Amino acid sequence: MKSGDRVMSLPVIQEIVPSGSLGTVQEVYPDGWGIVKFDDGISLLIRLNGNFEVVKE
């Protein structure tokens, strides 16, 4: 994943955000973490790998 990618959250993190939530990757760090800003306005620092999939809109 890279900055600007549109992503959808996977069920594995449904305790944090509802499964299928859409957002945009704001920053990506070398350790696999990054900041995602969801369409509802919430931004989270979260592990990207395994928690999101890139979507084409």
Image (tube, rainbow, N blue to C red):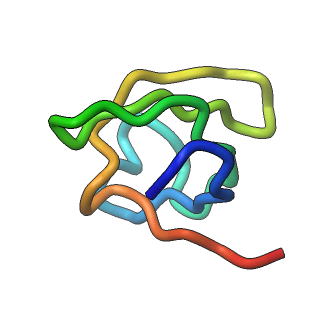
Left or right of 50? Residue 57 is right
Left or right of 49? Residue 42 is right
Name the outermost residue toward the left: 31
Give x and y (percent) for residue 13.
34, 49
Q: Quadrant of residue 33?
A: top left
Q: Quadrant of residue 55?
A: bottom right
Q: Is residue 27 above or below residue 5?
A: above
Q: Is residue 35 above or below residue 10?
A: above
Q: How many marks?
A: 0
Left or right of 27? Residue 5 is right
Identify the residue shown where x is 68% and y is 47%: 4
Q: The N terminus lies in which quarter of the figure?
A: bottom left
Identify the residue shown where x is 68% and y is 36%: 38
Q: The C terminus lies in which quarter of the figure?
A: bottom right
Give x and y (percent) for residue 18.
55, 49
Q: Quadrant of residue 34?
A: top left
Give x and y (percent) for residue 24.
67, 44
Identify the residue shown where x is 65% and y is 31%: 37
Q: Nearer the viewer, residue 55 or 12?
A: 55
Q: Is residue 55 above or below residue 50?
A: below
